[in-house]
Image (tube, rainbow, N blue to C red):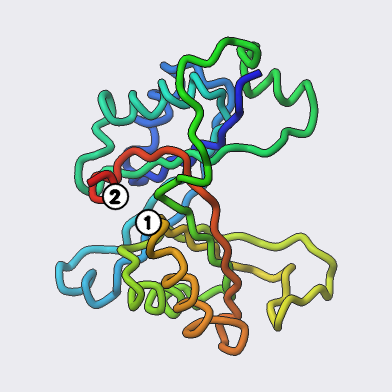
Amino acid sequence: MQRMYLVLTITNREDEKEFENFFNSKEIPIVYSTPCHGTAKKSILDLFGVEESLKTVHYTIVTENKKAELLKGLTKEMAIDLPNKGIAVSIPLSSIGSRHALEAFADGHQNDESENEVNDMTQCETELIIAICESGHTEKVMEAAREAGAAGGTVVHAKGTGAKYAKFFGLTLADEKEMIYIVSTRENKKNIMTSIIQGAGPHTDAHAIVFSLPVSDTAGLRIFDK
């Protein structure tokens, strides 16, 4: 049985329909999309007279073979490697909830022979850092991350669904939250996470918590590839 992957693609909002058509052309059975925005400093936006960059995150779960086809297409057909076009990362799933869900995401191809070498996750050179903080404190998290070398991030607005009064180091889990996705090299991951905790952690108004996931493959990250 093939390993299943979450493929997360971040694109400009204006290109949302173009990428949806691309996913359809690749016969991806299920794609979820959500609006988000970039984290460029306000001073930079004001300098160039531009508005905050609006983004869309597309989520899909695919087989090993389809993941390889998808990432190749994003580079060759969608030119995601061009500056400010977008990025994509893939993250292996450890399990999936039911046979029906597996069949739906795999589109009946879960038992196909893998056409690609499965990556050893202990050797992954890229990590996806996810920070969760109080709404309105994204810039504090990003300032701390940039001090440790982070190039940028993508913000998704979220709402917790935990117990009504659940708290985690001062963070009320069921309140409005902001999730910041930061792609980093494995080498610099620890520095970025430490800087976020020191500059925007539970002892601050941001109450940020942070964790990371190993990324098996990327598209649109030439600087990391080099």
What residue is rendered at 21% in x and 72% in y?
Answer: 44
The structure residue drawn at horizontal position 16% and vertical position 73%, both measured from the top left corner, is: 47
Q: Which residue is mark 2?
A: 224
Cα distance in 3D space between marks 1 and 2: 7 Å
Question: What is the total number of numbered labels drawn onto the structure image?
Answer: 2
Residue at image coords 60%, 72%: 209
The three-letter amino acid code for the residue at tag 1 is Thr
Identify residue for label 1.
Answer: 185
- Quadrant of the image occupied by residue 220: top left
Q: Amino acid at mark 2?
A: Phe
The quadrant in which the N terminus is found is top right
Residue count near mark 1 (Cα–Cα under 10 Å), binned few <14, some 14–19, many ≥20: some
Judge whether 79 appears above or below 130 on screen: above
Q: Earlier in the sequence, mark 1 or mark 2?
A: 1
Estimate the x, y position of residue 76 in percent, counting from the top left: 25, 25
Residue that lies at the very extreme toward the left in this rendered image: 48
Residue 66 disc label: none
What is the x, y in percent for residue 58?
48, 39
**Contact, CB < 8 Å: mark 1 with mark 2?**
yes
What residue is rendered at 17% in x and 68% in y? 49
Q: Is residue 115 above or below residue 41?
A: above
Classify residue 90 as left or right of residue 63.
Answer: left
Between 160 and 97, which is closer to the camera in this rendering?
97
Residue 194 left/right relative to 172: left
Q: Please tell me whether mark 2 sits on a helix, a strand or a loop.
A: helix
For numbered disc 1, what is the local secondary structure? strand
- Considering depth in this image, is 35 or 73 the residue closer to the camera? 73
Q: Residue 130's spot in the image, x, y percent? A: 53, 60
On the image, which quarter does residue 140 sit in? Answer: bottom left
Relative to 14, does residue 160 appear above or below in the rendering?
below
